[in-house]
Amino acid sequence: MSFETIIGLEVHAQLLTRSKMFCRCSADYASTPPNTHVCPICLGMPGVLPTINKQAVEYTLMTALALNCQIADSTKFDRKNYPYPDLMKGYQISQYDAPIGYGGWLNIEVDGQRKRIAITRVHLEEDVAKLVHHAATGGEGYSLVDVNRAGVPLMEIVGEPDLRSPEEARHYLVKLRTILQYLGVSTGNMEEGSFRCDANISIRRQGSHNSMAKVEVKNMNSFKAVYRALEYEARRQRKAVSEGGKLTQETRGWVEERGKTVSQRSKEYAHDYRYFPEPDLPPLILSREWVEEIRAKLPELPEERRQRFIADYKLPLYNASLLTGSRAMADYFEDCLKTGILSNLSLPKRAKMVSNWLLGEVSRIMNANDIDIANFRGKVSPGRLIKLLALNLQADISTATAKSVLEEMFKTARDADDIIHQRGLSQISDTEAIEQEVLAVIKQNTQAIADYKAGKTQALKFLVGQVMRATGGRADPKLVNELIEKKLAEVSPSGEGR
Amino acid sequence: MKLSREDVLHIALLARLGLAETEIDKFREQLSNILENFEILQSVDTADTPATAQPFPLHNVLREDEVVPSLPPDQILANAPQKERDFFRVRAVLE
């Protein structure tokens, strides 16, 4: 019996505004002492009046446009009522039947195949307070409430159940996050909770249009967790059905340590939200002028940028995809090209060189240190990197030396020049100095010279290697090669001078 | 429209109100009255009136994204029935 997996994702992303959604408290709640970014509006005190943060509306419009959504002519906020201590007011201000954006789509690429995933809606709401649970030790368990996060603008992006595998779900999430990062509307950080994902997953018999019971999966705190939870759930559902069991529509939580999903008893009456229009907030009319003004300000998005990298820099598709995979990496790459250093090279040549270093050595350093390009940039600016590449290209230092210098630049945040000078690493291009080494090597390696004369060209490489070793890798290999060939032409097979 | 006893208990649960036996009948009466009044309003022909979520002729009341200082935690927590350090403390609520 063959089954198909049906997945739809719901993403919540905190918006990068300075202030909260409906009041002027700071929205920066990370690493602030508890309950320090709180006011009577956050607490839902009687008589307070919330007001809408314009920037949050514009960020949501930008996202909706980037996701090819239709934009509502007019929209409003609604109250979603439910009793839970993370809601100070007893309701969350959200959008019910008039989301800002709807009917959009997003392209993903899986195994070279492009697939369009429909976006149901993009709407705006507010985040809730953070609860810290304390288990009962003898007495009754309790929770501590920190209200700093309550009221932070939260954008919800609901996708259609168009995804057919955990792998597609992962691609969708990565693509969505990349778009939000390009737009600069969210950090997209899943581990810190500023980008969250819930999933709906069900299975159906191949060819059938009727899915079995839909399961909602929560508590996935990383891209890997989403993938693993969906893999687990797809397998669990198949197994249950194959064994003659019945699936129930339920909410299950992903338990990372156990690598499985666990049924969560649903809250009684949890879905009786009694939505009604928020009486404190007048509706929003999204005029065509406003929407077009926002559209005109949209930055270049990942796919456009990738195409431009291929067209302008003649980069292969693979390199262009990797470089534009994050806005920060693409910016670093282009900032290197903008420095004016090495501008004697053609743009494609320069681009190829920078691309090779970024995807090679720089990526290696980032992986080894578990950091991203922003952290790397903090140590090695684009200007510093390209100066290093220039020194390498002008043969002041060999490529091997350049790599070790880059490592040290990263560790010490110093200039390449500085390190090369201090460690005495600059390439020896002084013919006389190299000639002396060449003569010494020739004297010591009569067998290799005999081999060379006998037609074994491999022997030349060996001799070059010997000279490079004698100079600590600092000799210009091209020059060494030339000098050896010249000297060998002058000496007899015995190694004696003519 | 007459509310049932179950309707009243459901509404009470949503509002987190405990009702005494005598109150159930009393509120059943009162809530039913309110609904009956709305039924009268609903009989008005509104076919030519556009739907509105707001009685005021206002729209697009927006504010710039600017931060002002919040209140100090001791004031925020001043009305809390229970607190611990600078946190509100509540009874455990499990998902």
Image (cartoon, rainbow, N blue to C red):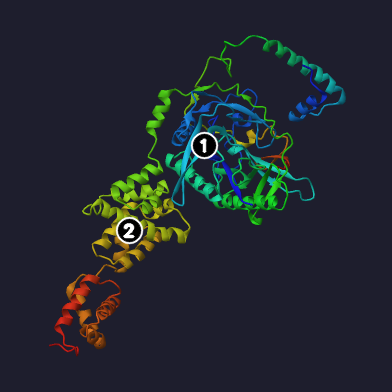
Relative image position of residue A485 (x, y in whole percent): 18, 78
Mark 2 lies on residue: A415
Image point 53% across, 51% down: which residue?
A167
Q: Which mark is residue A119?
A: 1
Front-most of residues A117 and A372: A117
Q: Position of residue A23 (x, y in %)?
A: 55, 30
Q: Is residue A58 visible?
A: yes
Q: Looking at numbered disc 2 in the image, what kind of residue is underneath it?
A: Asp
Q: Is residue A163 left or right of residue A466?
A: right
Counting from the top left corner in percent of width and height, residue B67 is at: 50, 33
What is the secondary structure assignment of the residue under circle 1?
Answer: strand
Tell me: residue A414, above or below residue A176.
below
Image mark for residue B42:
none
The image quadrant where one finds the C terminus of chain A is bottom left
Furthest-left residue in view? A498
Label 1 Cα neighbours within 10 Å, binned few <14 / some 14-19 / many ≥20: many
Q: Is residue A13 above or below residue A238?
A: above
